[in-house]
Amino acid sequence: MGACRGKRCIGRLKQILRGYDKSIVGIATPRGPMSNQVSIGELYPAEQHELLIPHTRNNPVKRTKVDSFIAGGGIGGSALFRYLAGAGQKPVLINFGRGASWRNIAGGRPTFSIPELSDIATKNLQIFKELQKIRNIDFMPINYVNFAHNEEVYQALEASMAWSDAEMVKPENFRKKISPFLSSKMKNYLGALKTKNCWQATPGRVIDLIRSLGISKGGTVLEDCQLIDIGKDGDNYIILVKDHNGEYKEYETSHFINALGPEGDKFAKKLGIETGLYPVKHQAFITRRLPMMGINGKPLPMLIDRRNYKGYSAVYGQQLAETGQVIGCASPTNEPVETDKNLIINSKEFLEIISEVFVNWLPDLSSVDFQAVWAGYYVEPRMIIDPQKGLFLGLRGQGFMLGQYLAKLYVDQLTGKQVPEYSHRLKLSGDGLPEKAFK
Ligand SMILES: Cc1cc2nc3c(=O)[nH]c(=O)nc-3n(C[C@H](O)[C@H](O)[C@H](O)COP(=O)(O)OP(=O)(O)OC[C@H]3O[C@@H](n4cnc5c(N)ncnc54)[C@H](O)[C@@H]3O)c2cc1C
């Protein structure tokens, strides 16, 4: 009948039906067997979950036993893969899609308001340095510059100087010590904490490298393979996977690790674990290539404004040394509103806030085009690194800079090595080392 909508469509339908001596009287009532959008167990979860029966054209699904199995191949899953392979566990890693690990803005810093997180970040910095020696990951040491817009932030930044290599820069020295391109008209900051020992690297290169290190130690990566279902048979996990060719396969293992990022909670529930995790949409942008805008021809450091302004709690960005592009991000103040929101659409409010903050910092940027804008999920509200429960989730906005050492801690715990006392706080039963001040 071609495309037709609403009233016009019903009018046309009536006209056609008249020709058959039929007529429409009223509308259908919303009763069975029309449709069913929600299963009862979703609203009142029971221990028994739905049973998925794959359509396999009568061929039985082949089951393979493996030593260890990781679902999700972002920075978290790929680092676990590397370390598990190194420990002789012959891991199989499956990944389907591109999560936050390919969508982040590639920054690392040691400054946190919680010293344990600073320790984890410092260990990660070492790992990044070692990776760069093996193969180019575009590793580049940079500075982080946190602007203080009020006394409270100023004091929190000042306090963090006790455990980080940092310097408080006065507003009159911004152009000399941060970037000659910063506006001389900025009046809204009391100062800025410039922290050393921060870094950037290209996320895709890091993931490729750590996966290839795992492969060289006996691991197997299955890309474009989707976890469909998981259950337990005694102590073993039975894992149903749809592979790249659309075929279903089963794996059996005693070591299963859920590193599925925003999908992690869904599959933890299938094993009867409540994580309390949820995805929060974060938007990002990248400009076209630019000349270096930092001091002495270096890239612009990571600039951060943590003002609560126009619906955003932080706006931040840095210049990539490899290309000269400025890459940046904004964190929504009201995270529940952004929970699970579709990643395809960038909001006008996001484009407005980043334009305003970046042009106020760097007036020259007003004539520069965005090369791209996109979004990804932060998994909030806490980290869960729990080898007993097989969980490696909740890396928040810090997974690129913290993920690899956390994976090492996970594998060290599995293999009975000594780990720092704070590792226990990262378990589901712990508090997750919650960073609040410098998220
Ligand atoms: C815009 C933005 C900017 C950020 N900036 C920074 C930053 O500068 N520094 C920093 O440290 N962190 C940053 N982050 C956070 C960081 O990217 C994340 O913490 C980190 O990437 C999380 O890694 P992950 O491995 O836990 O999850 P993910 O990267 O989401 O990996 C999970 C993987 O599992 C796959 N998957 C999902 N479902 C299935 C399934 N059923 N079967 C198989 N595979 C599946 C996903 O596609 C994905 O590839 C940023 C995040 C965003 C969104």
Image (spheres, rainbow, N blue to C red):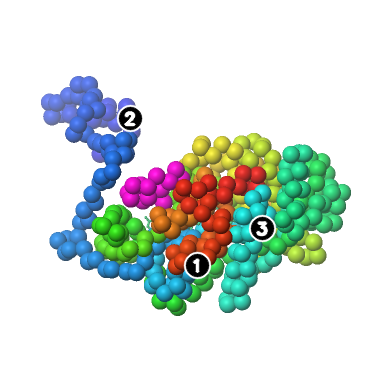
Residue 151 vertical placement versus 62 (above, below): above
Q: Quadrant of residue 309?
A: top right
Label 1 is placed on what type of residue?
Answer: Lys
Q: Position of residue 281 (x, y in %)?
A: 51, 45
The residue at the far right in this view is: 172
Disc 2: residue Cβ within 8 A of ligand 1's nearest atom: no
Can the viewer see residue 371? no
Q: Nearer the viewer, residue 189 or 70?
A: 70
Residue at 62% over, 55% down: 116
In the picture of the structure, the residue carrying the numbered disc 3 is 110
Disc 3 from disc 2: Cα separation: 57 Å
Q: Mark 3 or mark 2, which has the lower sequence index? A: 2
Q: Left or right: 335 with respect to 180?
A: left
Q: Nearer the viewer, mark 3 or mark 1?
A: 1
Label 3 is placed on what type of residue?
Answer: Pro
Is the residue marked by circle 2 packed among few (<14), some (14-19), or many (20+) residues within 10 Å? few
Q: Quadrant of residue 307?
A: top right
Can the viewer see residue 52? yes
Magenta residues, start to end? 264-277
Residues tagged 3 and 1 counted as in contact (Cβ below 8 A):
no
In the picture of the structure, the residue carrying the numbered disc 2 is 6
In the picture of the structure, the residue carrying the numbered disc 1 is 417
Q: Quadrant of the N terminus?
A: top left
Disc 1: residue Cβ within 8 A of ligand 1's nearest atom: no
Residue at 45% over, 55% down: 386
Residue at 26% over, 57% down: 234
